[in-house]
Image (spheres, helix red, strand yellow):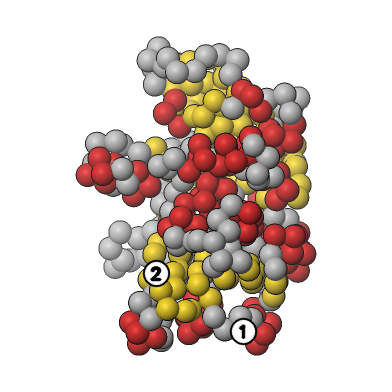
Amino acid sequence: MKSRMVVVKVDDDPIKNIVRPGPHQRYRNPRVSVETRTLPALHPNEIRVKIMYAGVCGTDVHLVTTNPETGYIKCSAPAQIGIEGRVIGHEGIGKVLEVGSNVYHVRPGACVTFESIIACHYCDECRRGDFNQCRHALLLGLEKDGIFGDIVDVPSMLIHDVSYMAANKTWCLAAACVEPASVAYVACENTRLKAGDVVAIFGAGPIGLFAAMLSKSIFGAARVHMIEPVLFRRKLAARWSDEIYDIDEFFKYGPSAIDVVIEASGNMDNLNRVFWRLKANGRVAVLGRSGEPLLLEAVDHMITNAISITGSRGHLGGAFAKVLTLCRNGRLSLDDAVTAIVDGPEGICDLLNFPEKILEENCKVLVNFDDQ
Ligand SMILES: [Zn+2]
Ligand SMILES: [Zn+2]
């Protein structure tokens, strides 16, 4: 069986003298193209899926964008790209065509969406239930071939059966957004966000936008302040924020007493600047990756006020099911973050070759693989 897939190739040229260089210190000259590949025999633990819709993530964009200052790709999330390239993509919904011989919990014909972290279930972290921090985790579409293809094979442990969503197009679009929304959900949980909190969110990309939706309508924030430099994204985010600013406006007119900061922009300088405004027992979740160091001047303020900073990654440990239940019950409309739907593998390729189109004129971009 053949499938057209979106493949990223890079030159592997690590910076010398860095121990364990990240992708942003190792890969350069990214190329993205559509390749027709022959699918191997289906692995006993995998399912074969005809993709319906897939979501383009900031990580996909960073994987194919070069940082002009370093000459390396921007992506600092774990990625492993060999000479054959990597099939990217990790957010989506599709129809099951075939199941491996060890797979019993889903049947052909079912409609499924996917988690994107393959946890080992054997390491100490997994056994403690900290699946998002699995020592041997593999990220779909970064460390294992992903789902940007007409037909792809996916580990069966990643799927959630959403057949109840299949007949409704809006729900299908929403299902393709559950992965990033669940990442935002975990970030809200990690900040111990509670009713009445004042929240500041840096970055109105998809994760920031979902964090705003969740803060406001699910976690009970009293006020959501959103900070975003791109005009298009500011306009879109206005619907789920009480106040929206560019960076200068925020530091001039923004609130002086904040309970929770969610950093989804990757700009560490903002974090240093906002820190003085955190109240006693303030909480900060950092999830925007840029590979940049965090300089923190307000250390005394942090100690005096018992402010905590936490990293946040992933969507395992129940967030996916929670977000799906919220969608199903009409409490979240994730498809509201979708600003464009492009057609097929070629559509993604065209888009990824002009990433500023995604960053400046869009929020969540989906790819329609149906009827190709
Ligand atoms: Zn993603
Ligand atoms: Zn593990």
Indicate the position of residue 59 as horizontal and vertical percent values: 54, 53
Indicate the position of residue 329 as horizontal and vertical percent values: 64, 37
In the displayed structure, does residue 347 sit left or right of residue 256?
right
Q: Amino acid at mark 2?
A: Ile
SS assignment at label 1: helix
Which residue is depicted at the point 50% across and 69% down? 260
Which residue is depicted at the point 52% across and 51% down? 185
Please name whichever residue, 243 or 139, is drawn nearer the observer in this view of the structure.
Answer: 243
Mark 1 nearby-residue class (10 Å; few <14, some 14–19, many ≥20): some
Identify the residue position indicated by label 1 in the image.
251
Label whose residue precedes the other's in the sequence (1 or 2): 1
In the displayed structure, does residue 111 sit left or right of residue 167?
left
Indicate the position of residue 227 as horizontal and vertical percent values: 64, 71
Identify the residue position indicated by label 2 in the image.
309
Indicate the position of residue 33 as horizontal and vertical percent values: 62, 41
In the displayed structure, does residue 133 sit left or right of residue 162?
left
Q: Amino acid at mark 1?
A: Phe
Which residue is depicted at the point 41% across and 74% down? 281
Residues at marks 1 and 2, CA–CA distance in whole angstroms: 20 Å
Mark 2 nearby-residue class (10 Å; few <14, some 14–19, many ≥20): some
Q: Quadrant of residue 13?
A: bottom left
SS assignment at label 2: strand
